[in-house]
Image (cartoon, helix red, strand yellow):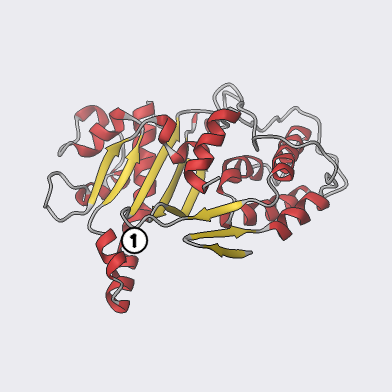
Amino acid sequence: YFKQDGPTIKLTQKGLTDKVIAYTGMSNASPQKTPAIQEPLGSDKNGLAFHEEWNFSAAVGMLLYLSSNTRPDIQFAVHQVARFSHSPRKSHGQALKRIIRYLIDTSDKGILFTPNLSEGLNCYVDADFAGLYGYEDDQDPVSVKSRTGFTLTLFGCPIIWQSKLQTDITLSSTASEYVAFSMAMRELIPMRALLQEISSKLKLTVVAESLVRSTVFEDNQGCCSLVNVPKMSTRNKYLSLKYHFFRSHISRSPGDGKGIVAKYIRTTEQKADIFTKGLPPELFGKIRKLLMGW
């Protein structure tokens, strides 16, 4: 559903939202203020088997489509349950129901785009260091993997977002943030090139001006220092070269023409925080307001 009200554009998928609520038979369930509890969701290998009248994978599929288009606020929660589509447990079903309860409370909501032409193509990136430790089997390598979350915004409006576990195991929170930064840059760099081509072909001066400089907002001071230094230290050499590719794109001084600046931002203003972990209701609402406009 698309609706424009002055400078604000509203995108919603109420039909699909109502469909997944009805599919799980939870139309009369009580609502929740957040889509996930604060504790991470583990594999629960010894837990009770999933047993519901509806198909777990089918519900996850609908939620994935919803979270990828108009509901970034449920992206983290949906990715958590999607990991167990092949062998869900009762606890995973409860986690999915939590998402449904949240959607019941916000079924008519979506993304509110209110373009701010003073902002360019920016990126907010965050990581949750070894967040599954203590919730997964400690002999399973996944228990110490970190989670990356980021969003790209154009004129202050989210256009791409992602929440996923990192493939490699990092040894510190700074390293996990650095890996997340690199993952986000793999989206930002080609997106800048695409928008530059579009603005050139269509002569969109507003877009061209916005690409003079992109800012990547990071809430870890150590990661900002690591990104901005011209040379890596020996203690960080274990971070493989595949995570260093973006360094030549980072601006070291004004006017060097590289166009991407790494900047520290407080955690309470970090839009990507919503993609890395379950948040308490008050903080979740604040980040959602910054990200989605409501």
Residue 112 placement (x, y as % from top left):
53, 54
Check the picture and name the quadrant holding the C terminus: top right
Q: Residues within 10 Å of mark 1 (few under 14, many from 20)?
A: few
Residue 58 placement (x, y as % from top left):
75, 54
Above-or-below relation of 255 to 46: below
Count up the numbered dots: 1
Instruction: Give the farthest residue toward the front.
Output: 6
Indicate left or right for 93 with 151 as reference: right
Q: Determine which quarter of the picture holds residue 120.
A: bottom left
Residue 275 placement (x, y as % from top left):
51, 40
Q: Which residue is drawn at 52% across and 28% down?
A: 131
Instruction: Give the farthest residue toward the bottom.
Output: 201
Above-or-below relation of 48 to 105: above
* In front of the other: 140 or 76: 76
Q: What element carries label 1?
A: helix
Q: In the rendered structure, which amino acid carries the disc numbered 1? A: Pro
Q: Residue at x 68, y 52 (%)?
A: 108
Residue beneath label 1, please? 190
Q: Determine which quarter of the picture holds residue 62.
A: bottom right
Q: Which residue is drawn at 48% across and 28% down?
A: 130
Q: Is residue 86 visible?
A: yes
Above-or-below relation of 168 to 23: above
Q: Is residue 169 visible?
A: no
Check the picture and name the quadrant holding the N terminus: bottom right
Indicate left or right for 63 with 6 as reference: right
